[in-house]
Amino acid sequence: MNSEDALPAVTALLADYCAHLDADRLEQWVGLFAETASYRIVPRENRVQGLPAAILHLSNKRMIADRITVLRTAAVFNIHVDRHMVSAIRVIERLPDSVRYEANFCVYQSDQEGRTKLFCTGLYEGEVALGPQPRFLQQTALVDTFSIPALLAVPI
Amino acid sequence: MPAIPITEELRTLWPRKDYSRVPFRFYHDERLYREELERIFRGPTWSYLCLEAEIPKPGDFRTTLVGETPVVVTRKDDGDLAAFVNRCAHRGAIVRREAFGNAREHICVYHRWCYAQDGSLTGVPFRRGVAGKGGMPDDFDPKENGLQKLKVHSMRGVVFATFAAEVEPLADYLGPVMTAHIERLMHKPIRILGYQRQTVFGNWKLYMENVRDSYHGGLLHEFQNTFGISRVTQVGGARMDAKHRHHVTYSSAAEAGDGTQLHKDAGVANDRLRLADGRLLEYVPEFADGQQLTISSVFPNAVFQQIRNCLATRQLRPRGVDEFDLVFTIYGYVDDTPQLQELRLAQSNMIGPAGYISMEDGEAIEIVHRATKGEATTSGLLEMGSLGEIPDEIRFRTSEVSIRGFWSYYAALMDMKPDGAIR
Ligand code: FES
Ligand SMILES: [Fe+2]
């Protein structure tokens, strides 16, 4: 598979990723990650200054699953619906069994009264393992909207 | 007839003399908020600006806010700190537009007035005009037209500034309790690990109340409760300075009673949650006193936190009566091992806008703010812990006494104490 052939696989994986998050299928969202995968939400200002801290720093699939467990059992957050928009998906590097990709994203949040706000916008940077079942090896949401409106509970 | 100052009008709304009732209007009144910016943020207080480790080299600067006033804080070539209002003396443009950087001088883009590192005016283009025509009047004095300077002082690398000409020295303002606490946190050189930010849709005072509220910790935040990070049943308490303007809350892992059963009796679950990877709950002891959690606040805009090994400052920036920003500066120590730094980063999952023990606060503040808007006569209730005179030390965690302390100092500074105030 060359880089162009990988694009449909990455695109389909991202479509599932967004659909699971937006439909509150958070456990299925966890299933899109490989065992060793990391997930991070990185403020653009930290990236620019070369600083390692993140808004979420989940360094393996167990930590990613824990995030969802906490949301399901022990967290209080704003009642809302998310809607992800992803565009400009592109494969930027072909590796032996995986590809590195980038894509633009934004997330809108709507409340129970049907009012919608732009929640955040940024760049996905990730690595996807190819094969019959493509999975994320790494997923970073580099957020431009790093002054998070109110709170961030559900992953983006 | 001169208008009655808003503080005089609102002063009469306190239902009680000991600050155990807070009129909801105090979170929403636009005119009161304008007074707060003047009397508190531009008044005789010291506001937290940054950590010295963020501006280590000569010329390093950061832009920040004190209240709503834009401020530049910088390290001059001689190594000293300076802070000045980031508003051009000419026509009022923002002089330093970047969030951070390094510069020997600061030039306003609009008409290129040039300022030195301490904010003094050093250059006005075409001051003498062109070919003898135009230019500034002969008596224009650059010395009179610099950027407004703030008094700036560092306590163990924590940088504070004030607009007030008449104000007690920083060490006196902080008092022995807060000074000792900052010395504890800054006991060796620190390294900045990064930032988290949050915009909360509520009045800024709701946040200063929230950080002083040791009652809510294990009730709102089930994660805190389950993993014993902070429980109301733990051995702990709070200390305040004599004026009750700052506070330090602490708790140790020890329980004052059967915490699990007491919570169960109170209808609070704390045994439902299991983590597949509990490494972020580890604690590497690094303070002699054994306290695993300390949260403190310095009036009006700073919070210092130690949640296990997760260390951070929080700077509060009001943005109108209905909104404020929080800037979390996460740090470790220069001599951290890579493992300890990784633990700090993992534990930073617990704090900030997405944090396991803090995301609820954004929601709690917002729902209070939303539901109390427009209330003219009703009040919130602060009776947990004690009534009447406010003690400097509280030796338990089921307490709202520190919040009454906040209001007692607020009222003194705003000149809106109730008649016969008890503090
Ligand atoms: S406004 Fe700054 S130089 Fe004119
Ligand atoms: Fe809280």
Image (spheres, rainbow, N blue to C red):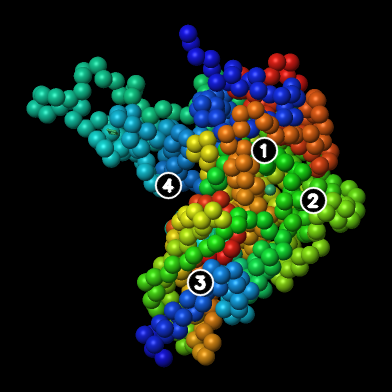
- Residue drawn at 41 percent across, 27 percent down: B148
Are the numbered discs 1 and 4 placed on the same chain, yes or no? yes
Disc 2 marks which residue? B231
- In this rendering, the answer to whether B285 lies above or below B185 is below
Disc 1 Cβ-to-ligand 2 distance below 8 Å? no
User: As rendered, which of B322 and B240 lies closer to the eye?
Assistant: B322
| Few, some or many residues within 10 Å of mark 1 (<14, 14–19, 20+) | some
Point out the residue furthest to the left here: B131
Label 1 lies in what chain? B
- State which tag comes first along the sequence, 1 or 4: 4
| B81 is higher (above) or lower (below) than B258 | above
The chain holding disc 4 is B
Q: Nearer the viewer, mark 4 or mark 2?
A: 2
Q: Compared to B396, does B306 lie above or below?
A: below
- Cα separation between marks 3 and 1: 37 Å
The residue furthest top is B1
Identity of the residue drawn at 69% across and 68% down: A69
With B422 as the anchor, is B185 left or right in this view?
left
Q: Are marks 1 and 4 in contact (CB under 8 Å)?
A: no
Task: Give the residue at mark 1.
Answer: B209
Numbered tag placed on residue A18 in the rendering: 3
Assign a secondary structure to mark 4: loop
**Amino acid beneath label 1:** Glu
User: Which residue is denoted by mark 4 in the rendering?
Assistant: B99
